[in-house]
Amino acid sequence: MLTLKKISKSFHQRGLVLDNLSLEVNEGDSLAITGPSGSGKTTLMNIIGLLDRPDSGEILYKGNSILSYSRE
């Protein structure tokens, strides 16, 4: 249902936050995102929610790329 392939994201002040992250979540799955402060949890959720864009990688929802969606 939701597939992230090789997602990377960096920021000028913090450097590399997500490095080649891949994840697959199927319908009916439960998922918990945990980790220490600064580990990229919020960055990941912002990318999944289209509030931010990854520097590289692909995000698929039901097999379709969501990075091509527009805000309109």
Image (cartoon, rainbow, N blue to C red):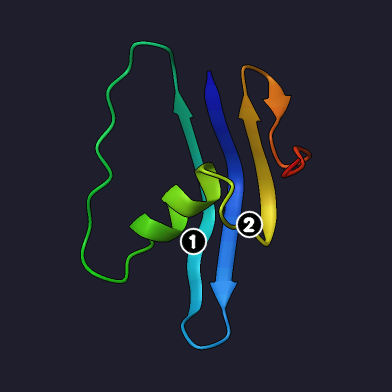
Q: In the image, which is nearer the foreground, mark 1 or mark 2?
A: 2
Identify residue for label 1. 18
Relative horizontal placement of residue 6, taking residue 21 as reference (left or right): right
Relative horizontal placement of residue 24, taking residue 12 as reference (left or right): left
x and y percentages locating residue 10 in the rendered image: 56, 72
Residue placed at 62% from the left, 17% from the top?
A: 62
Query: In the rendered image of this protein, does residue 6 appear above or below residue 12?
Result: above
Relative horizontal placement of residue 9, taking residue 67 as reference (left or right): left
The Cα atoms of the two marked residues, 1 and 2, are separated by 9 Å
At label 2, which amino acid type do we have?
Answer: Pro
Query: Which quadrant of the figure has residue 43?
Result: bottom left
Q: How many marks?
A: 2
Query: In the rendered image of this protein, does residue 45 appear above or below residue 65?
Result: below
x and y percentages locating residue 32 in the rendered image: 24, 37
Category of crowding for the residue at label 1, using alpha-carbon neighbours closer than 10 angstroms: few (below 14), some (14–19), many (at least 20):
some
| Residue closest to the far front | 72
Residue placed at 64% from the left, 29% from the top?
A: 60
| Residue closest to the far top | 28
At label 1, which amino acid type do we have?
Answer: Leu
Q: Are marks 1 and 2 in contact (CB under 8 Å)?
A: yes
Identify residue for label 2. 54
Query: In the rendered image of this protein, does residue 36 appear above or below residue 25?
Result: below
Report the front residue among 20 and 55: 55
Query: Which quadrant of the figure has residue 38?
Result: bottom left
x and y percentages locating residue 66 in the rendered image: 69, 35
x and y percentages locating residue 56 in the rendered image: 69, 56
